[in-house]
Amino acid sequence: MSASKPSLLILYCGGTIGMRQDVRTSALQPKLSAEELIEYAPYLTKEFNIRMQTITNLDSTNFQPHHWEEIADAIYREYDNYDGFVVIHGTDTMAYTASALSYALGNLGKPVILTGSQVPPDILGTDAVSNLVNACLAATMDFAEVAIVFGTDILRGNRSMKISESKRNAFISPVFPELGSIRLQPEITYQSIPRRHGGPLDFKNAFKGNVVVLKITPGIHPETISAIVDSKIDGLILESFGPGNIPNRETNLLPPIKKARKKDIPVLISTQCIYGTTRMYLYEVGQSAMDLGVIPTGDMTPEAAYVKLKWALGQTKDGKEIEKIFAKNIAGEVTIPD
């Protein structure tokens, strides 16, 4: 390797960026290898010392928590050997993987960049090459985050959500500022971003437990939640109305929540408002649920909250310890009030 060029490890996981259309059905399917993909941007190998490593080649719809662990393991093993890391990934579950890596790779001192595309590289109008190039450029910059680089945006990974299946800017960071943007080249604009450093990783790479996420709707039967609680679950996340409001009259959901708490099943309360945060003290319908010992998720994205609970369950089954984990900002995923 040339010492004068930045070194990058590109971890290939598949996604649209590595797909081709089936000649019979026209459906997009994973086809390209990592080596075939990099051929679409040959100048990358002139600017960087690049090594490709294949983790898997999947439509990210089929991604599982063990894939998060495999990606984190690969970064951990090669952490001292590269200036930055790029994870090529499908868009559908990219925010989940980004959140997982942010928790697993504690005390991160280098960029870990996730990217993909909305259009495969051999279809006219593709965004694959530009996203890949911008991700590699971002991975050599002076910041230390797990970030998503996509379209014209640079976003904190565990603050990101996919909001479009077709727009070039497929992701948003609804309640946290963008880290930067893609102009002529990637630019970091967020002032409080962590910078590169040479400290060791605080590596905690286990995601465990059967966590169920349920969206509260008008008229939902308490028996539905009760049946879930009686099944083999380790955690429950209820997507509530407004700032954390849970029905407590005609369809009273407090009894099944109380049942879950008696079983020491952690119950998280998030909000259905994309630009919202949980403030369960504001209304009586929130306070009555708070009294049962639920955990509000604040301004976390649903993806970040789900993954954080699985990460917490990878460390402990003790409800009090899980509460302590959720009272902390682990990787910039939540705003903790002073």
Image: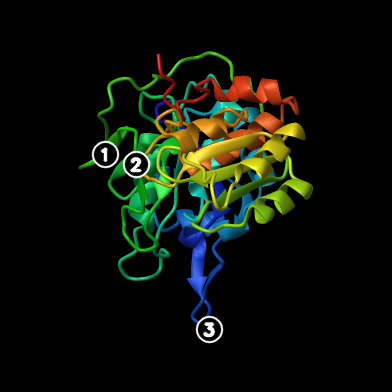
Q: Nearer the N terminus, badge 2 or badge 3?
A: 3
3D distance between C-alphas at marks 1 and 2: 20 Å
Secondary structure, mark 2, is loop
Q: Which mark is residue 275?
A: 2
- Please give left or right for residue 109 compared with residue 130 in the image: right
Where is residue 171 drawn, in percent x and y? Answer: 37, 49
Q: Is residue 55 above or below residue 22?
A: above
Give the camera-side residue of 53 and 100.
Answer: 100
Q: Is residue 298 above or below residue 131?
A: above
Question: Callout 1, which amino acid?
Answer: Ser
Q: How packed is label 3: few (under 14 Cα within 10 Å), some, or many (20 or more)? A: few
Q: How is the image coloured?
A: rainbow
Give the camera-side residue of 222 and 296.
Answer: 222
Where is residue 178 drawn, in percent x and y? Answer: 30, 35
**Image depth: mark 2 or mark 3 in front:** 2
Question: Callout 2, which amino acid?
Answer: Tyr
The answer to whether residue 296 is seen in the rendering is: no
From the image, which quarter does the C terminus lie in?
top left
Q: Which residue is mark 3?
A: 25
3D distance between C-alphas at marks 2 and 3: 39 Å
Q: Nearer the N terminus, badge 1 or badge 2?
A: 1
